[in-house]
Image: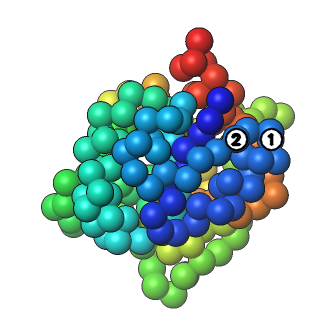
Amino acid sequence: MLIGILALQGDFERHEKRLKEIGVDSHRVKSCEDLNKCDGLILPGGETTTLWSLLQWNGLFQAIQEYEKPIFGTCAGMILLAKEIEGIQKETLNLIDLTVKRNAYGRQIHSFEAEGEAPFLGNGAGIRMVFIRAPKITRLGEGTESLATCKGEVVMSKNERILVSTFHPELTPDVRIHRYFVDEFVRINDK
Ligand code: GLN
């Protein structure tokens, strides 16, 4: 199994590290050829507008829209995957029916760490979450569900093939969320 990590900009090295810790090989995705080698894709955080332009420039935007394998988007990666971005008309990848709001915790709260609830991890699972100029999910649409919450907000969601989080699971040593993506999305899709 090989997981692609979009490596055009932003926080891809930590995703590589987390996957390595769970014994999963990763491949840096910079082109459509890279993408086609992979069994799943991680879209890391970064700056949505920069990522959007880079994806358009090398054809990956359309390739990801047509990619039929599982995708995990964190923060800016989630924003790109969502159907709708509040107040912005830009075309998104539109692979999960969510409305999101960028930088929704305000400029003052640039970044923070908090304890969230992720019941899908079992045993009343609390989990440390790191938010960096984080977006909020303001609407859960067709076929989506809430997986985790923090401070009253939905911070993680999924549909059949796409997993998203508003926080950065790659920035904490806890590998459970990466393992969940690999086991519940990539492995199952592989069968
Ligand atoms: N604030 C960024 C944006 O809207 C996302 C931040 C991140 O990915 N950590 O593009």
Neighbourhood count class around disc 1 (C-alpha, 10 Å): few under 14, some 14–19, many 20 upward: few
Return the residue at label 2: 25
Q: Where in the figure is residue 142, as x and y percent of width and height?
A: 32, 30
| Amino acid at pointer 2 | Asp
| Amino acid at pointer 1 | Ile
Residue 64: quadrant of the picture: top left
Residue 52: quadrant of the picture: bottom left
Of badges 2 and 1, the one in the foreground is: 2
Residue behind label 2 places its C-beta within 8 angstroms of ligand 1: no
Question: Outermost residue, front direction?
Answer: 33
Q: Residue at x 16, y 61 (%)?
A: 89
| Residue 22, above or below 59 | above
Left/right of residue 134 with respect to residue 143 in the rendered view: right
Left/right of residue 75 with respect to residue 3 in the rendered view: left
The foreground one among 103 and 38 is 38
Q: Secondary structure at mark 2?
A: strand
Q: Where in the figure is residue 19, as x and y percent of width and height?
A: 72, 46
Calculate the distance from the C-alpha at mark 2 to the C-alpha at mark 1: 9 Å
Q: Secondary structure at mark 1?
A: loop
Return the residue at label 1: 22
The foreground one among 64 and 89 is 64
Q: Residue at x 77, y 47 (%)?
A: 20
Q: Where in the figure is residue 147, as x and y percent of width and height?
A: 58, 39
